[in-house]
Image (cartoon, rainbow, N blue to C red):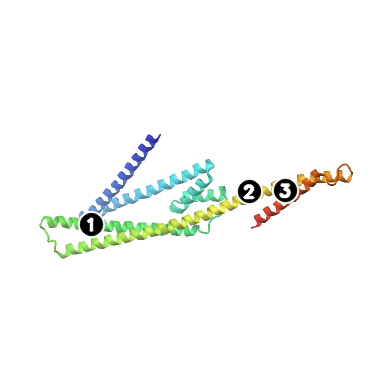
Amino acid sequence: MKTLLTVAMLVGASALVGAQERLSDQLRKGIVQEEVNQNLTKAIEAYQAIVAQFDEERKTAASALYRLAECSRKAGKREQALAAYQRVVREFADQTALVDSSRRQLTTTFGLAPSAGAERDRTAAGAVAARERTRESLLRERATAEERVKWFEQRIKAGVVSRDSKEYQQLQKEFEQATRQFEDAGANLFELQKLTQRYAEQMAEREATKVAERDAQVMTQRMIKSVEAEIALIQERLTAMEKKSQAGVMASDSPELLQLRRDLLGLQRKLDELRSGLKR
């Protein structure tokens, strides 16, 4: 089993690396079509293919996470199901059908009211997505500048132009600026992701606390009903024994009668404590 799992993980990792390499190749081809061949139509097709692949990967990941939530729900794994549904809502706001289904399960199946922070979750997710798009745009700009520098260096090696030319110096500055902007965008995105993750964890903790409190209330209510039933039985037995005492069949200070009265007082105190805790 471990061997099969290891093989599966290696195959998955190889597939992921291969997919990333294919995307990089497509990006380079698009840049060549745009900058070298001046063929904007071909460049647009290449870029659109990359974006389509990225969108498809997000759709696949969201579907897998939703199916995980469904399986956990059917298996009775409440906490895992809740966490997975909430991740779909929080991290894949663009997958509206899956988000709507997840919210429906959270409200109807698990009794979670729509969170007041749902709008904040969508806003945070939108901010991260916007930063990611900005970073991707800067990455394309950086790749374009790098390709132009490489192309110019090939011309320098061929003796067509001089390394001291103003055009080459300007290209170097543009590439350095694009690199700095890309790195800054990456740092900003990382910080925003950390803040978003911290906020999501806090919201998840609050939801878990609410669920625990609701479960505790349900348990307390059940205990109250159980204690009330015990009190009713003891009162019934106590009434019957007091009648016997009044009829002279049983002594008024009978140990059994006294024990029943002590049990009744103890249960009443317990009932008062449970009701008081439920009000808090």
Residue 42: tell me if it is visible: no
* Label 2: which secondary element: helix
Instruction: Classify 10 Å Cα crowding around label 3: few (below 14), some (14-19), many (20 and above).
Output: some
Residue positioned most to the right = 247
The residue singled out by tag 2 in the image is 219
Residue for point 12% across, 55% down: 157
Sooner in the amino-acid sequence: mark 2 or mark 3: 2
Sooner in the amino-acid sequence: mark 1 or mark 2: 1
**Closest to the observer: 180 or 269?**
269
- Residue 144 in the image, given as x and y percentages of width and height: 25, 57
Instruction: Classify 10 Å Cα crowding around label 2: few (below 14), some (14-19), many (20 and above).
Output: few
Residue for point 45% across, 46% down: 65
* Residues tagged 2 and 3 counted as in contact (Cβ below 8 A): no
* Label 3: which secondary element: helix
Q: Which mark is residue 228?
A: 3
- Residue 28 in the image, given as x and y percentages of width and height: 25, 51
Name which residue type carries label 3: Glu
Q: Quadrant of the N terminus?
A: top left
Mark 1 or mark 3: which is in front?
A: 3
Residue for point 37% across, 35% down: 3
Mark 1 or mark 2: which is in front?
A: 2
Residue positioned most to the bottom = 166
* Label 1: which secondary element: helix
Residue 86: tell me if it is visible: yes
Name which residue type carries label 1: Glu
Mark 1 vs mark 2, CA separation in Å: 65 Å
31 sits left or right of 278 in the view: left
Residue 1 higher or lower than 112, as above or below: above
